[in-house]
Image (cartoon, rainbow, N blue to C red):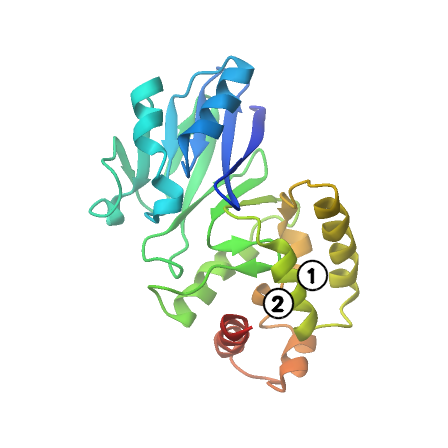
Amino acid sequence: MSALEIVTVPCLSDNYAYLLRDAATGAVAAIDAPEAAPIIAALEARGWGLDWVWLTHHHGDHVGGLAALVARFGARVLGAAADAGRLPKLDHAVREGEMVSLGAAQAAVIDVSGHTLHHIAFHFPQARALFSGDALFVLGCGRVFEGTHAMMWASLSKLARLDPATTVWCGHEYTLANLKFARTIERDNPALAEQGAMIEAARAQGKPTVPSTIGRELAANPFLRAKEAPLQAALGLEGADPAAVFAEVRRRKDAF
């Protein structure tokens, strides 16, 4: 089994990029490129090069540093084939279901359209790590800018089926705001209370709230709990279609 080293790189005001290094080969990839300087600093501090930048979606706060990274390190760029017209120039275009390699480490490409069309996530099954971009956040999910609520629910449902021990590495530090909102939906959820205490302690120390796990998110994230009876009851939507329940949660968060 290939060991995968993961480094969290804070960027801009609340973005995260991630550096991944395959221990077996020394191959290095960045997940997204919000800005170049912090990523370059993190690489140089470790004496690493950069072989790849893997893009989750086309938004500027995820690709803004790409050109400088390519120029400095000669990194190749990977992204969704279906979104090649909006992404920077790709060296490798991928589709859902494909496996992509970082040295000896293998990741599955998952289409998580909704926040944007053709947004992708990367799942390393052996390392039990998910890089979800702006699809799934700790206690939250991305705004539905380009897709539909039903599409976003279908995308999140794919992620919900992953091993509960899978770590979730998301694209933003939105967690305190997500926690505040989640408490308005399921204030009496004990899993939310436990996770909330951990989150508040981490942020009080200036630490990231990532990674979470799929298991923790299934227990506390209202956007993943649309088919659960306690959440449906809290909304007065007992027995409703989970996609409709999700849509109501998302509408409430949009107005929050």
Q: Which residue is mark 1?
A: 219
Label 2 crowding class (10 Å Cα cut-off): few <14, some 14-19, many 20+? Answer: many
Left/right placement of residue 9 relative to residue 101 reads: right
User: Which of 186/184 is in front?
Assistant: 184
Residue 183: give its label: none
Residue drawn at (44%, 28%), measured in percent from left and top?
37
Depicted 36 relative to depicted 252: above or below: above
| Cβ–Cβ under 8 Å for marks 2 and 1 | no
Left/right placement of residue 34 relative to residue 183 reads: left
Residue 248 screen position, x and y as percent: 52, 78
Depicted 83 relative to depicted 4: above or below: below
The Cα–Cα distance between marks 2 and 1, rounded to whole angstroms, is 8 Å
Residue 152 screen position, x and y as percent: 43, 64
Q: Amino acid at mark 1?
A: Ala
Q: Which residue is mark 2?
A: 222
Label 1 crowding class (10 Å Cα cut-off): few <14, some 14-19, many 20+? Answer: some
Residue 146 screen position, x and y as percent: 33, 63
